[in-house]
Amino acid sequence: MALAAAVLLLLPGILFTAMAATPYPHGRGGDPLLGASKKYEGSSDLVDLRYHMGPVLSAAPLRLYVLWYGRWDPAHQAPVRDFLLSISDPSPPRPSVADWWATAALYADQTLANVTRRVALAGEAADESASLGRSLSRLDIQRVLASTVAAGHLPADTRGGAYLVLTAPGVGVQDFCRAVCGFHYFTFPSLVGHTLPYAWVGHSGGRCADVCAYPFALPSYMSRSGMAALRPPNGDAGVDGMVSVIAHELAELATNPLINAWYAGEDPTAPTEIADLCEGVYGTGGGGGYAGKVAVDKQGRSWNVNGRKGRKFLVQWLWSPEAKACVGPNASD
């Protein structure tokens, strides 16, 4: 698997869309010195990614439980499901989703246990009626999980489980589109009865694809500059953009599940994590509004990793603790 560094110039307006770790709105912007050096985050000399003594998700397999909130089109669910099932699948040709996940698996905790390379889709549940409504607070995500677990639709898996709450088109979440496209945290025992690592990601199609489905949709200022959006590999900008955000959040959930493991900066309520450091980089040379060198199929659709059933996906690179740079399996040098 070829790995290469990318000099990262982060995208204005896109930087903070997928990195929020706290279930509360940000009251402040995190470490000012870190923020002042964002344009240098591809430089190993200026990135201070540190380990803070907490656990990583090392239990094998990591069991994922998905809660589909709102009314979902099965055609939109299928690519997401296939991506999750591809994380540990060795059969797709390289560069593969499994090759991409191998970077996350380089991270270990104080027990010397690495993030597991084995990830299983252990269960799914649906809340088609959107039981808490179509405008959710961040803490509502935990409440939805609590009711789903209490009803027995998903188990409370405290030994190797992690949860994904995926909201359908038409469902709003606090700060969605304005400040975040997804976030991860852990549930509060007072709300859910257990401490469970989870992530939320929203479908941005029809709402803010230009914010949350980059590079398949572009903010107006980028379009005016003559840049063109990439064609999504599975034919839907909202879904393909969501897959990339899911990948982002899963990598950070695995390496910083309790917000006390791997991150940069001094403020754990606004950490800069292993995917945040490579925001907007999908291939060699990526950064500054350029996704990087990626593959293009005969239909003109862009991708950088292979998945199961012939699926292709475009997911952002991750920060490697070994290379001290953004790396990806589709690197061309």
Image (spheres, helix red, strand yellow):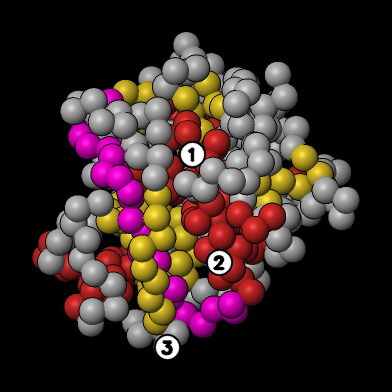
Residue at 56% over, 70% down: 77
Q: Secondary structure at mark 1?
A: helix
Which residue is situated farthest in the bottom direction here?
129
State left or right for residue 174 relative to residue 206: left
- Residue under numbered circle 1: 101
> Does any portion of residue 298 appear in the rendered image?
yes
Q: CA distance from mark 2 to mark 1?
A: 22 Å
- Residue found at x 18% / y 28%: 111
Q: Which residues are magenta?
A: 51-74
| Residue 67 highlighted magenta (yes or no) | yes
Residue type marked 3: Ser
| Residue with the mark numbered 2 | 203
Kindly identify which residue carries mark 3: 129
At x 65%, y 37%, the residue is: 94
CA–CA distance in space, label 2 to label 3: 17 Å
Q: Residue at x 53, y 51 (%)?
A: 86
Figure quadrant of the C terminus: top right
